[in-house]
Amino acid sequence: MNEVIKAIKERRSIRSFKPDMPEKKDIEEILDAGLYAASGMGRQPVITIAFTDKAQRDRLSEANRKIGGWPDGFDPFYGAPVIIAVLADKRYPTYLYDGSLVMGNLMLAAHSLGLGSIWIHRAKEEFETKEYKELLKELGIQGEYEGIGHCAIGYIDGEVPSAARRKDDRIYFV
């Protein structure tokens, strides 16, 4: 089987991560893979922010937890030590789709390097807050960016989940 198709079929969402930080070269390779996602008219309106500092990562987790309405102590990132926030420039009509393609590339790249990943929502709501708008300014990011999602990455703690049975009647030919 083709390696890309094999990776697509084998990748799973991971909900239990070891606290060990992946190697920086692996994080950089994953981020680089995101840059190669397709985008409408090749405009590349998507940016990524890698949260690798534990204090910053934990602050982001707490903001996400509050937005999600979970109880104190719950980590919506399941212990993953790396969180990649994906944001896209709202000036482009395909920004949401372009950001989604970046998320897919990030998760497949993590899988190909032996790391687990999961897409976590609520980036939109986080980056609408004063705190995270300030972070964008501090990073020198200008414009109207919307959070698309978070790609939580790390070493898998436990077994890789089995694939869910694929639903029937989802492919049609004309």
Image (cartoon, rainbow, N blue to C red):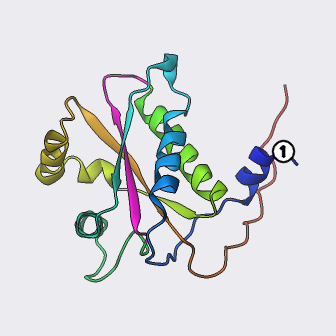
In-image side of 84 versus 146 (left or right): right
Left of 143 or right of it: where is 116? right
Q: Residues within 10 Å of mark 1 (few under 14, many from 20)?
A: few
Query: Taking 3 as reference, is 111 left or right?
Result: left
Label count reads 1
Residue 35 picture location, percent across and down: 49, 35
Nearest the camera: 90 or 58? 58
Which quarter of the picture shows residue 167?
Answer: bottom right
Q: Which residue is mark 1?
A: 2
Task: Look at 57% across and 56% down and name the residue there.
Answer: 110
Location of residue 95 with respect to 13 vertically, above or below: above
- Percent x, y for residue 48? 37, 43
Which region is colored magenta?
80-93
Which three-letter amino acid code belongs to the residue tagged 1?
Asn
- Is 116 above or below relative to 149? below
In the image, residue 45 above or below residue 124: above
Q: Quadrant of residue 82?
A: bottom left
- Give the residue drawn at x 51%, y 26%: 39
**Outermost residue, top side:** 41
Where residue 8 appears, x then y in whole percent? Answer: 71, 51
Q: Is residue 130 left or right of residue 164?
A: left
